[in-house]
Image (spheres, rainbow, N blue to C red):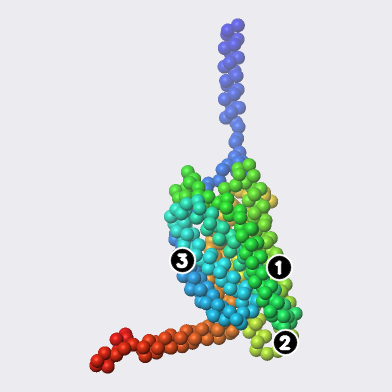
Amino acid sequence: MSSLLLNFSEFYNQELNSSIQNITYVVDETTVPCQEFTVSLSINIAVCILFLHIFLLAIPGNVIVGLVIISNIRALSPSDVYLFHLVIADTLMALALPFYSTSVVAGWIFGDVMCKLVNLIKEANFYTSILFLVCISVDRYMVIVRAMEARKIQRLFCSWAVCGLVWILGVLLSLPALYNEVNYFTDQALPICTEQFESDSADEWRIATRVMRHLLGFLLPLCVMLTCYGVTVARLLRTRGFQRQRAMKLIAAIMLAFLLCWTPFNLATMVDTLMRANLVKNDCAARNAVSLAMFITQSFGLLHCSVNPLLYAFVGEKFRKRFYQMIHRTRRIESGMLSRATRSTPLTSDGVSHFH
């Protein structure tokens, strides 16, 4: 009996070993965890330098535009009101850029509170900026196409009320940024500030916020802007004079700058949203490529806060006139103060003034 069991066990071991040797294993790539996406040091340094250049361009540019608008507060138009609030939004975004430039090379070192606050400012700027651009396009449509310049006082009052609603809506839409917090991942050397939703519903929340951003922060405003500017250009084409060409150039510059700055980032985030919803190919190579594209295109999107003063102000003839008037008025005030100070300064016995 024992000899039979022994022989059977030997036969079983031989068959098992031969069957294992003949098995071919095929790795399912969808079940293999992706290597964490990382950006090279050279790209991080380049982005850091870009953020600093945007900061140095945006702050003085927006401050100058704001000062010019305030200096002519009695002659404000509704578009000037929207432009002034756009300046505020872009200035707040520019003030957040040093935090991002530091984080790309040293990680997020500013704590959870600043992590939430800076991202809240960024998201609020994302929504309010494009909404103020929409307001400007609608106002120009009303003036050029609907000829509502005669109702300027009513439109001016409504513009301030609309700006208040835009700020409220922008803050409400950016509240998901409060889910950002500092994370210290074991596979990353530096701490990062990122979204942290509940683990059981993280994908649903992330997709919902992305869809809201795509619709309210890009697609719908873009449709309104294209419609308003398209009708406005069609009306200008039926008019004559040099003013028509100048207005068309400004409108073309506005739309081109917006599309060049924000379309690449929005397209990259849309692809990322489709991948998270498993509607398109979702492998490691594709996810890393989209992550890199989002990282780079977001940097160029932030460039828009420094381009706006050039497009909406320095390109416009009315702004240049106001700017020169402000400079002339400032110099006149300074020369008047200097002359009064010189007259009021007592002279010494030798007739030399103590004023330097």
Q: Residue at x 70, y 89 (%)?
A: 240
Mark 3: few, some, or many residues within 10 Å (few <14, many ≥20)? Answer: some
Mark identifier at residue 52: 3
Look at the numbered disc 2 and give the secondary structure of its residue. loop
Measured as percent of width and height from the top left, residue 300 is found at 54, 65
Earlier residue among tags 3 and 2: 3
Is residue 172 in view from this perspective?
yes
Image quarter for residue 24? top right
Image quarter for residue 102? bottom left
- What's the residue type where badge 3 is placed? Leu
Is residue 234 in view from this perspective?
no
Q: What is the C-alpha distance between the residues marked 3 and 1?
A: 32 Å
Q: Is residue 350 above or below residue 272?
A: below
- What's the residue type where badge 2 is placed? Thr
Measured as percent of width and height from the top left, residue 208 is found at 67, 52
Quadrant for the C terminus, please.
Answer: bottom left
* Residue annotated with mark 1: 223
Q: Residue at x 49, y 59 (%)?
A: 100
Q: Residue at x 58, y 54 (%)?
A: 177
* Residue annotated with mark 2: 239
Earlier residue among tags 1 and 2: 1
- What's the residue type where badge 1 is placed? Cys
Residue at the limit of the structure toward the bottom, as seen here: 351
Residue at the limit of the structure toward the left, as seen here: 350
Mark 1: few, some, or many residues within 10 Å (few <14, many ≥20)? Answer: few
Measured as percent of width and height from the top left, residue 202 is found at 62, 46
Q: Residue at x 46, y 66 (%)?
A: 52
Quadrant for the N terminus, please.
Answer: top right
Horizontally, residue 296 falls left or right of residue 138, namely left
